[in-house]
Image: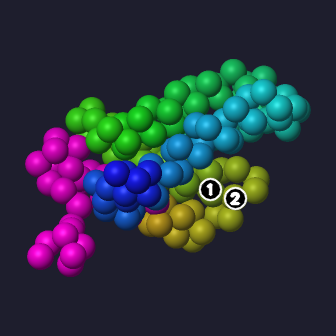
């Protein structure tokens, strides 16, 4: 089997939106978080937790936790691990609330309306992850293409 066939089979295991979350977690684990931890100057470092922005050493000290979360997400999506439900949805819900909190209380935030819009956007994958329990239990598969279903 060619590597393209293997890759195609891997991506067909999940719906497109879950593949997007998988790709995001993979990018954050392999590219962004190592840059953030090892190359970004402490003075420029920021991490957002529950809508509160940490700066400098506080951000640098909590960045490994973000790295761990993204790494666990990448592994969990790749292997479709059962522990991803409900934890992926719980983390996504935290991000949803954080988008509202950040917009309301951070000086760079846009206020209530942009916060509600951002929260609504992030609520979509949160709800999708919450409803994906069977996918993480291996009892539901992504829809097949016409060629596969025939």
The residue under the point 64% across, 64% down is: 111
Spatial separation of the CA atoms under disc 2 and disc 1: 6 Å
Which dot marks residue 104?
Answer: 1
Q: Residues within 10 Å of mark 2 (few under 14, many from 20)?
A: some
Which dot marks residue 41?
Answer: none
- Asked if one can make out residue 53 in the rendered structure from this viewpoint, the answer is no
Magenta-drawn segment: 122-150
Q: Position of residue 150 (x, y in %)?
A: 12, 76
Quadrant of the image occupied by residue 120: bottom left
Quadrant of the image occupied by residue 140: bottom left
Which residue matches tag 2?
Answer: 109
Q: Position of residue 124 (x, y in %)?
A: 38, 64
Of circles 2 and 1, the one toward us is: 2
Residue 98 vs 72, above or below: the answer is below
Q: Nearer the viewer, residue 22 or 110?
A: 22
Mark 2–mark 1 contact, CB under 8 Å?
yes
Q: Is residue 52 magenta?
A: no
Residue 132 vs 115, above or below: the answer is above
Q: Nearer the viewer, residue 139 or 67?
A: 139
The residue under the point 67% across, 41% down is: 31
Q: Is residue 137 magenta?
A: yes
């Amino acid at each position: 089997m060619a590597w393209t066939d293997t890759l195609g089979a891997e991506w067909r295991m999940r719906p497109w939106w879950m593949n997007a979350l998988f790709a995001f977690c993979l990018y954050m684990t392999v590219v962004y978080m190592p840059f953030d931890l090892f190359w970004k100057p402490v003075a420029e470092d920021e991490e957002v937790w529950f809508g509160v922005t940490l700066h400098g050493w506080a951000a640098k000290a909590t960045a490994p936790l973000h790295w761990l979360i993204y790494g666990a997400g990448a592994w969990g999506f790749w292997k479709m691990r059962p522990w991803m439900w409900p934890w992926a949805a719980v983390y996504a819900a935290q991000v949803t609330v954080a988008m509202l909190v950040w917009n309301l209380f951070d000086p760079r935030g846009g206020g209530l309306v942009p916060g509600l819009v951002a929260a609504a956007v992030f609520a979509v994958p949160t709800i999708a992850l919450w409803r994906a329990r069977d996918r993480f239990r291996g009892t539901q598969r992504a829809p097949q293409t016409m060629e596969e279903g025939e």
